[in-house]
Amino acid sequence: MSSAQASSDLELAADLVRRAGALADRLLLQGLSVAEKTSISDVVSNADAAAEAYIAGRLAEARPDDGMVGEEGAAAPGRRTWYIDPVDGTYNFVSGLPAWCSAVALVDADRVLLGAVYQPRTDELWLGGVGSPTTVNGVPVPPLVDRPLAEISIATYLHPPRMADAGIREPLWGAIAGAAALRMIGSGSVELAAVAGGRIGLWIAVDAPDWDWFPGAALVEAAGGVTQVLQHRGHRFHLAGPPTAVADARARLLAA
């Protein structure tokens, strides 16, 4: 992929998430219709659907040879794939909490090419990818400092019904117990952007959907961090952060 193509893709991604996030925010202020998906905390709103439809429509016009996969059902095959999370952190979104975002990632056959995350309530646009160091509102983030797990915070999500599964609970607790602090914000892309920006130390998730993983993983890698997905006890554990902390967390996960 040429540098001109990469720059064009990044500009498109930035425009998509900024406009989709603004659309969702307007619909929130107008009043939402909300439905449960798989549980009382897994919900979808008309803003999710509208923001995804907007992104999907733009991509069909601007990148007709690319495919897409959206959380709310957008799908098309193509030479590369755009992953769409129109409102990441919908439970926060519908509850009036500010920690939510719109996110996209572009993936080819071998790697994640770029990620874009826009947080409307803080007006922060995060961009980064292959050959494009992570920025927030156009300002490069400092390179991630390599630190051990014991010196940093860890962000994850503990879904109460799933904690009955020892294959989730025990490895997660093993990693969490080795960190300096625990944070749960409720939006994977918001948390991963915070890892890229040095605000949170490490991110761990279990069986994360691709649209929750790829946008933020691109940001972490472009900030000098590392990302890993490992299979353990019947689940996929996703890790992102500084190399030493990721290695520490991996060892603790696999020991449980």
Image (spheres, grey):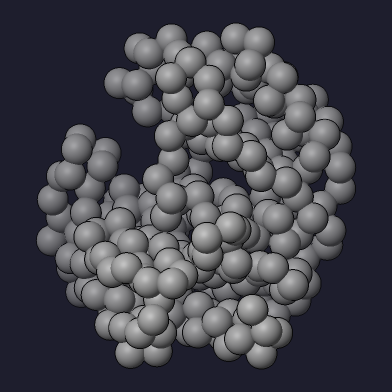
Pinpoint residue 248: horizontal percent, then vertical percent.
76, 25
Number of callouts: 0
Residue at image point 52% right, 55% down: 214
Is residue 164 positioned above or below 94 on the image?
A: above
Q: Is residue 126 above or below residue 188?
A: below
User: Residue at (31%, 48%) from the top-left corner?
Assistant: 91
Name which quarter of the figure residue 176 lies in. Answer: top right
Of residues 254 and 107, the one drawn nearer to the viewer in this rendering: 107
Question: Splitting the image into 4 quarters, where does residue 57 fall?
Answer: bottom left
The residue sitting at 38% across, 13% down in the picture is 165
Position of the N terminus by quadrant = bottom right
Residue 131 falls left or right of residue 91: right
Q: Is residue 110 left or right of residue 201?
A: left
Q: Is residue 228 left or right of residue 40?
A: right
In this rendering, does residue 6 appear at all?
Answer: yes
- Residue at image point 62% right, 71% down: 127
Give x and y (percent) for residue 79: 44, 72
Answer yes or no: is residue 22 visible: no
Residue 177 lies in quadrant:
top right
Q: Please say if 125 is above or below 173.
A: below
Residue 58, percent from left and from top: 34, 85
Please state, as top left, top right, bottom left or bottom right, where the C terminus lies in the image: top right
